[in-house]
Structures are given as structure tokens and as C-alpha cells.
Image: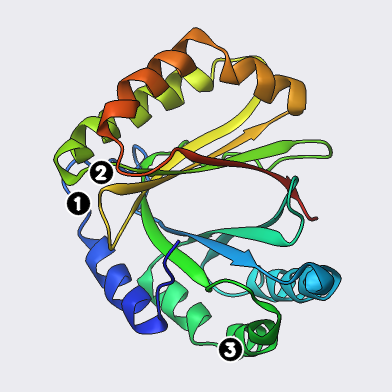
Amino acid sequence: MKACSGTLIAGAIVAAVAAPAGAQSPAGQPPYLYAVTYLEVAPSATAEAVGLIKQVAATSRKEPGNLRYEVLQQIDRPNQFAILEAWSDQKALEAHGGGAAMTQFRDKLKPLRTGPYDERPSIPIAVVPNSPAGGAGAIYLITHVDVAPTFKDATIDMLTKAGGDSRKEPGAVRFEAWQQSNRTNHFTVNEVWKDRGAVDTHIVAPSTKEFREKLGPMMGALYDDRLYKNME
């Protein structure tokens, strides 16, 4: 996964204000801005990284315009993390990214990292307002979907349908699909399921299998799905 610098993020956020063709903001809701950040540290630095991530999360949630700041740890590889953010507007997100808390966090994290600080600004395409976070025992399924540019709009339609189907399943807590602002043929799907059993049932559901079969020929990279737990 390729990292985005602060300059690229700022430029992408400006572009996100005018949603790309096919993007769908939640009905009656402002076009909130989202971001997913992937982090990987040395296995020996896992505990230190957890402390730093929890600290910046607590500070970020108190900042003006923050709607969500979830910090996740990968279940199979606990030295890898994901941060899911939602912000009310561009000004709030830019202030957060350039603030003292984030500057200090990135500085302290840098010597621990074994991969890039991979931040991906996004806009919503299939989001239900006020979707809950995962409780104790909940599983987060985060997937990066990368398709050829010619299949972008078809993928948006498919992700929207997949969201509607998945939310009806037993054990579903949340299903969201975001479109990456600076690469509009890249998407993030973040799902929350009650427990691992609900995830396993979802994976073999007919609607999930149909979605994966149709998406396969459109993809430009592997279907990158990872299981996480909420760190808080």
C-alpha cells in the first residue's frame, strides 16, 4: 500500500468536496469526509505503538468536527493497525492533520514503523448515518478494493447493493463503502460483525459469493480483506 504525504492528503481532501461521479452521500446528510490509515510496526514495538495510537485517538475525538475515530488491531498480525476516521468538513480534517497531537504522533511512530504511514482520504458511497461501532467481541472486516478505472461506476453500484444485502444478515453491525478521493477506482469497505461466527456466515452467504464472482474480473489487485478487533 502506497503512502500519501500530507501535501497529497490536503489536495485530495480539496478534490473530495466535489464528489466524483457516481458517489452517493447518505440521504439528507452532509458529504462527510472519511479516512482510513494503515500502520505496520516492528513486532517488538507493538505494545509501544498501541499506547501511542490510543493516546492520539483520545485526543482526536475531542477535536472540533470529529465524528469517529476508531483504532483497530489486526487479529492475525497484531503489529498491524488501522485507523478509521470521519470528519464533518475539510477544515476540521485539515486542522486535525496539521495539529500538534498528530505531528507528535507521527514523529514518535516513525522509528517504530516497518511500512509507510498509509493514509487514504475518502468520501462515502454506501453509508448509513450514525452506524454503531463494534462492541466487545465484535470483528471488523476491512477490505481494500482496487478495480480498473473503466469499472469504477459499476463497482460503486455493486458495493451499494452489497451494503444493502449485508446489513440484513444476522450479526451485522455495520457495512460501509468509501471511495478514495485521490484514486477514484480504489475503495475501502469497512464492516463490523457481532462475532467471528457472523463473519464466517457472511463470507459464504449467496449475496457475498455473487458479489465476489462479479467483482473478480474487474479487479486490478488481490481482494485485500483483513480481520481486526477494536483496541478500545
Identify the amino acid type marked 1.
Pro
Left or right: residue 117 compared with residue 22? right
Q: Position of residue 176 (x, y in %)?
A: 48, 38
Q: Is residue 171 visible?
A: no
Task: Find the distance from the CA under tag 3 to the CA under tag 1.
Answer: 30 Å
Quarter location, residue 76: top right
Identify the amino acid type marked 3.
Thr
Q: Position of residue 164 (x, y in %)?
A: 43, 21
Question: Where 111 falls versus 182 (above or below)?
Answer: below
Which residue is found at the position 40% from the left and 80% from the top?
Answer: 5
Tag 3 and tag 2, C-beta contact below 8 Å: no
Provide the secondary structure element on which disc 2 rests.
loop
Mark 3: few/some/many CA within 10 Å (<14, 14-19, 20+)? few
Provide the secondary structure element on which disc 3 rests.
helix
Question: Where 120 falls versus 73 (above or below)?
Answer: below
Q: Position of residue 80 (x, y in %)?
A: 68, 59
Provide the secondary structure element on which disc 1 rests.
loop
Q: Position of residue 194 (x, y in %)?
A: 73, 28
Task: Find the distance from the CA under tag 1 to the CA under tag 2.
Answer: 6 Å
Left or right: residue 64 compared with residue 19? right
Which residue carries the number 3 mark? Answer: 103
Which residue carries the number 2 mark? Answer: 23
Tag 1 and tag 2, C-beta contact below 8 Å: yes
Mark 1: few/some/many CA within 10 Å (<14, 14-19, 20+)? some
Which residue is found at the position 83% from the left and 76% from the top?
Answer: 48
Residue nearer the viewer, 218 or 167: 218
Mark 2: few/some/many CA within 10 Å (<14, 14-19, 20+)? some
Which residue carries the number 1 mark? Answer: 20
Task: Find the distance from the CA under tag 3 to the CA under tag 2.
Answer: 31 Å
Q: Is residue 174 visible?
A: yes
